Image (cartoon, rainbow, N blue to C red):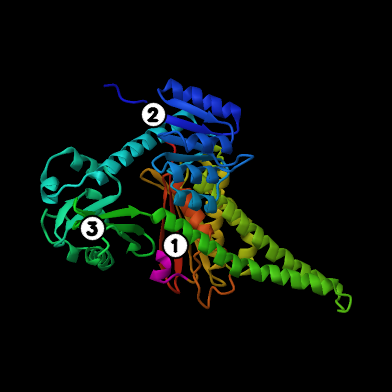
Amino acid sequence: MAEEKPRVIIVDDEKGLRMGTKRLLESEGYIVDTAENGTEGIALGTTGDYDMAIIDLKMPDIDGIEVLRNIKEKMPNTVCFIATAYASYETAIEATKLGAASYIPKPFTPDELINHLQEGYEKRKLILDSERLRKEREERLLEIATEKSRLNTIVNSIADGVLVTNLMGELVLFNPASMKYFELSNSIIGEYILDFLPASVKDIILKVLNNKESSKSFSAEIELKPNRELVVDVTCSPVPQPDGSLIGVVTVITNITELKRLEYVKSQFVSMVAHELKTPVAAVLGFLRIILDQNISTTPEQENDYLSRSEKRLQALVEMVNDLLDISRMEMKTKQREIKDIDIPEVVKSNLDFLELELQKRGIKVIYTAEENLPMVKADSGEVNRIFTNIISNAMKYNKDNGTITASVKKSGNYIVCAIKDTGIGMRPQDKEKLFQEFYRIKNDKTRNIPGTGLGLSIVKRLIESYSGKIEVNSEYGEGSEFIVYLPYKK
């Protein structure tokens, strides 16, 4: 029997994009329906059993998030994609919570769209298979687990972890994902497994086993690795026999690390706004009120001083907003690049020259060396300049007066290697570990009066890694720091 063709609905108010996408997908063997607005999209998506839906985020009548919510409520197994060029952390979190498979950034190429839909259709088939799996009930779960059947194939292909235990806490069914999440070796069917699971997971399983309401499930969010490195949603549900009595517990482990990371970034942003934006805005407002208050006598020199301070604080706020916008563009991969040959020694030298006056004021000596005839690096000049502007300015800001900055550029293996070393404050090991986290700033008596957003080095690391490069840090508290940048060169 021929395989059924995937059914797709396109909800987009741009007629050219909507019809062009329809023709492309039909040429690839898809069955495609279209809706020109959110209202029509909800009507079609909630009555037809579509495999996938491509939903535009911004539409004149109903936005894509509302369309997604309505479709997922009525057709939870439809795999939905949000297509947009205007996304934010808030919409990303909300769309993920509502069940969106992913974003498709506009404009997209035919290959990008087809790849997304192929992955979505595979997910759709797995969802339908897992639906059938949940409906299957066998009295002897141990026999099912040992049978080389299609059931095992389905369970093993599910990205979420699946782990089934019987009334005695013995393992009767599992897939590789569950072993990976709990960092277990290949367990033996029939082995008592509860003591090898995290305590919080064991407690949930026991709660199901001890619950008299055999139809009730329990779930919890659990951090399996610290600092939000791995966060999962664990749901434990009873496995009843035909007569309603309990025969075992099925545990499903879903990776929600990305969702929690987005939530954390949002909370950090709100916290940063409260601490980093409120103070300078209040200070500028205070200066302006003094100048404008006819009852306060001020000299022209004082007014110039107030205006100069206000300008510096507002400039810092502008830089912070630009950093946030850059991070957002990198997250959504909408930042445009102009790739060309870049002379790294020239970039480093120009940044040192630009800071020459400030360096002289603090008596900081610069030692700069570069190998001759170094090969070029293929990159965007603005991004490369930003990398070294940030690192070199930090070497100045966090240096001691009358200190030294040592900069060198050379070739090593497949990389152009630039090392920037200072004789400044340095870092403790715990600070070094968090250095590239967004909004993280080292806080001690020596850094209290040094301005910054905590975003610069995070952006630097993202930019370097986007060119298949890497950055290393050597530092000792009180002795200084060294940042080493590796960028692959053009061969």
Instruction: State the separation of the CA atoms marked 1 and 3.
Output: 36 Å
Q: Residues within 10 Å of mark 3 (few under 14, many from 20)?
A: few
Give the residue type that dot 3 points to: Glu
The quadrant in which the N terminus is found is: top left
Pointers 1 and 3 in contact (CB under 8 A)? no
Pointers 2 and 1 in contact (CB under 8 A)? no
In which image quadrant can residue 318 be found?
bottom right
Label annotation for residue 74 = none
- Image point (35%, 65%), residue name: 226
Q: Residues within 10 Å of mark 2 (few under 14, many from 20)?
A: some
Q: Which residue is mark 2?
A: 6
Front residue of 266/62: it is: 62
Q: Nearer the viewer, mark 3 or mark 2?
A: 2
Instruction: State the separation of the CA atoms marked 3 and 2.
Output: 37 Å
Instruction: Verify whether residue 428 appears in magenta.
Output: yes
Instruction: Verify whether residue 151 appears in magenta.
Output: no
Lower sequence index among marks 1 and 3 = 3
Q: Which residue is mark 1?
A: 482
235 to the left or right of 415: left
Counting from the top left corner in percent of width and height, residue 105 is at 51, 39
Counting from the top left corner in percent of width and height, residue 140 is at 12, 50
Q: Nearer the viewer, mark 2 or mark 1?
A: 2
Instruction: State the separation of the CA atoms marked 2 and 1.
Output: 55 Å
Q: Residues within 10 Å of mark 1 (few under 14, many from 20)?
A: many
